[in-house]
Image (tube, coloured by chain):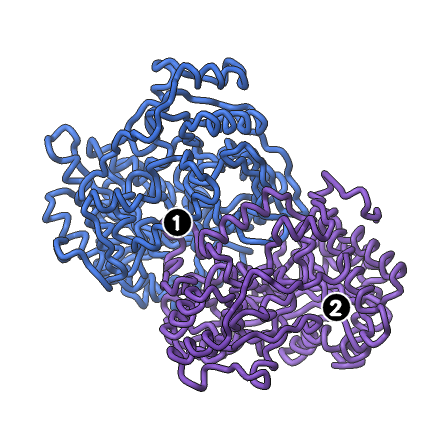
Chain colours: A purple, B blue
Amino acid sequence: MGKPEVLPDPQFQVDRHELVRRLAAVLPATSLLYSTEDTKPYECDGLSAFRKVPLAVVLPENEAQVQAVMRVCHELKVPVVARGAGTGLSGGALPHEQGVTLGLSKMKSILDIDPVARTAKVQPGVRNLAISEATAPHGLYYAPDPSSQIACSIGGNIAENSGGVHCLKYGLTVHNVLKVRFVTIEGEVMELGSEGLDSAGLDLLALVIGSEGLLGVVTEVTVKLLPKPQLARVVLAAFDSLEKAGQAVANIIGAGIIPAGLEMMDKLATQAVEQFVHAGYPLDAEAILLCESDGTPEEVAAEIERMEAVMRASGATQIRLSKDEAERLRFWSGRKAAFPAVGRIMPDYYCMDGTIPKRKLAEVLEGIDRLSKEFGLRCPNVFHAGDGNLHPLIMFDANVPGQSDLAAKFGSRILTLCIEAGGTITGEHGVGVEKINEMCVQFRPDELETFRAVKTAFDAHGLLNPGKAVPTLNRCAEFGMMHVHRGEERFPDLPRF
Amino acid sequence: MGKPEVLPDPQFQVDRHELVRRLAAVLPATSLLYSTEDTKPYECDGLSAFRKVPLAVVLPENEAQVQAVMRVCHELKVPVVARGAGTGLSGGALPHEQGVTLGLSKMKSILDIDPVARTAKVQPGVRNLAISEATAPHGLYYAPDPSSQIACSIGGNIAENSGGVHCLKYGLTVHNVLKVRFVTIEGEVMELGSEGLDSAGLDLLALVIGSEGLLGVVTEVTVKLLPKPQLARVVLAAFDSLEKAGQAVANIIGAGIIPAGLEMMDKLATQAVEQFVHAGYPLDAEAILLCESDGTPEEVAAEIERMEAVMRASGATQIRLSKDEAERLRFWSGRKAAFPAVGRIMPDYYCMDGTIPKRKLAEVLEGIDRLSKEFGLRCPNVFHAGDGNLHPLIMFDANVPGQSDLAAKFGSRILTLCIEAGGTITGEHGVGVEKINEMCVQFRPDELETFRAVKTAFDAHGLLNPGKAVPTLNRCAEFGMMHVHRGEERFPDLPRF
């Protein structure tokens, strides 16, 4: 399979001069960039292997300007690619060479905090962490915490349905957003969701969350806030095999415990991290688990006791408990810094994101290990063990001829492995351009057609983020992909794992 | 507004003889009912004010038979109305006079329980409570608990996105279902969702949950199970005014407590209930609150202490704590029996379902009280106070000429009140036929058109549950309805509240 090619799109033939003239009529000068010098910084997001320069970048200051841009693009039939903070890892904000990149970075006000309703109303460009910082004086916080939370925006979180290390207990973005204002490609504003738990009509809010910019642009977000737990502590447990660590995860869940976070790292990952942040991880362990409990001091004490007992019974070779908040943060710092830590010891890495049923953990890890040897590329693993979301980090050097492509092939094989185990090709990073070919493997043609039909209901001309997230059947045929559906069918030419 | 008229549908002209012949060819004889004697028991669901006899009732035994029925109806262009246990309160399963009612009652097997993944895979006809009963030996249960949980089916819960008294802490159906198998009107099977937290592509699972049979028929459901809390206790607090009780709700939430349940009943409701089930409610209180804590004994003890302190500070005139499981169940029995209790003292009642922002509680209750006097109909109130979901019960006697219509008008005015307060016309019962006119009030024409476009993506010929949930613009115009959107616009002829 290899790295998906991003083909030029003959469908769109845009008169750049006319486009800029029309955009200039509806935007302040500081909100419109069109010289290559100005637009080049927007050529990629966190998936830097893909780069394209858009015709123009617009940075609207308010909803009315977003509407105006959408109306211009709709009329001129120009692709629109929305962009939050550009930290996405699947290329969802990769520009379209015949399109406009619509950046939400200027819309970053926190509009309202209601401590009784426990909600905050914010603009899409507000940073994830800024919400928790602003609501901390009320003892509240916003739960989903992707590793990029210092930088990533809530609008981008909605596009990708982001998670984080605490989503096992507190859910993904879709579980923590109550309402959005949303601008359609025609420039109409819709309100989706409500301050209540349910809404009348079809659940378009849930449909929009995770839709990767395919349906419209979110201009205002009402999030659910949670009371900040009085205390949180982390158990760090070491194991002498990945299998035992995997079994410990199953045992924790099986014992009826719902940890606030349950993360696993293998030896390659802990070693990379220790050199970088000195989180205090044992270097001889084949795998470590980080297992957090939060709540009142009584709750935490009782739960930690049960967690430690399960870890011991599962064969942990070492168990440590964070003794204070500083140590708790230090334990997490290693996990949160795993990606840059790997980036530090190898010029390039490719962060994968797949989800598998928890019972298949050992089997899939073994498969990845086999592939690692086959491709001759190291692949440390960090993952949200509690919910089966893997992040293998394929290490390579793009300056060595052929390694980029090898890494992409390796990644594609890992995703196929996830599908065959009954899992899915995305945990929380989205499909974007990165995994668009694997969509052909995971879904049947009629399933892909349903996705496209739903998209068409919002965007009849296919102007919103074309070429991302949902492949055309044409593309699937072109790339020789075929559906491998939960092991029921398989492409005869695909190697068996 | 009054009771929505259900007009005959000239769009469908079905040859009944041909239909029955074709269905008989794909179903066992015991799965096809077509004599009026046999089909009449299916003429209504829990909203018995509306009745229609379908052309045929099919009761498939497996997914292949569901597919076969869908193919026949798709080919002959016959409406299909799916039906679970028939306990729905908004007429979602009201038959179509030119259609087939597809009952899922024979598909009631529990297919798999996985205690480590904490999931159960069941057929759609399985009763809500049966899931918790079957998983109890593993210490697990299925959290959403609508009052009808003894009878209602998981398939129906999905159609309506049902909640229950514990949904404040544990969420609605959409938060507790991981995956479904789903048959389209063309008879194709799709798998939506995954065993992981997120799935690739658009979130069609969330779209299908709460879609009231408009998109397809669910044939298999994988639900999330939760560990059964070791202990649960309920605080019963009495107040001498609705306002104080409402303020106590805000204070509980404001104190950072997330109760397992937080329910409010007014004096009319408690009095009706006490005569019926003797739940032990104080009869002199203007309002009572039921506030549950669950968890380990230590957690519950600590949380109950905080709940009681807030109740006292909020002016509770009496506070009682369930002393054992029997008393806890007795406290809840009154709340869960509120509907039949009211039914016992008045020939008819109309159970409303709307959601409002919690801060508007006192204002909306006052409005309902004023309407109650205006219409001369009593209206006890029970509601999920923690999430702002109201269930006013309009009492009337259908044998008194004009009272049915008066009750429907009263109900419609309550729903408009909810919309004007920034709320929504459904909390957990769905729209069905009951609230289809109010959809015209809550949503703008372009919003309704988006709902219809999404439906059309699944059902191009409009065969699935026609006339329910999403009105045509035609219908809105016919009934003289107009959009009242969160107080921004209003229909000039509507009386002000």
Q: Name the chain under label 2.
A: A
Answer with left or right where residue B332 lies relative to residue B128.
left
Which amino acid type corresponds to the residue marked 1 in the rendered image? Answer: Phe
Answer with left or right where residue B291 lies relative to residue B117.
left
Which amino acid type corresponds to the residue marked 2 in the rendered image? Answer: Tyr
Label 1 element class: helix
Residue A424 in picture, x, y percent from top left: 67, 52
- On the rendered image, what quadrant is the C terminus of chain B found in? bottom left
Residue at 53% x, 52% y: name it.
Answer: B203
In this picture, is B102 found above or below B224?
above
Asked if badges 2 and 1 are on one and the same chain, I answer no
Q: Is residue B459 visible?
A: yes
Task: Give the residue pinned by disc 1.
Answer: B451
- Checking the image for residue A350, the label placed there is 2
Label 2 element class: strand
Q: How far, Cα to Cα, is label 2 from label 1?
A: 39 Å
Residue A388 in picture, x, y percent from top left: 68, 55
In this picture, is B361 found above or below B469?
below
Q: Nearer the viewer, residue A460 or B208?
A: A460
In this picture, is A269 found above or below B45?
below
Name which quarter of the figure residue A71 lies in. Answer: bottom left
Residue at 83% x, 54% y: name it.
Answer: A367
Name which quarter of the figure residue B190 lies in. Answer: top right
Name which quarter of the figure residue A192 lies in. Answer: bottom left
Answer with left or right where residue A146 lies relative to residue B216.
right
Answer with left or right where residue B94 lies relative to residue B323.
left
Disc 1 crowd rating (10 Å Cα; few below 14, some 14-19, many 20+) is many
Q: Nearer the viewer, residue A284 or A301?
A: A284
Residue A322 in picture, x, y percent from top left: 68, 74
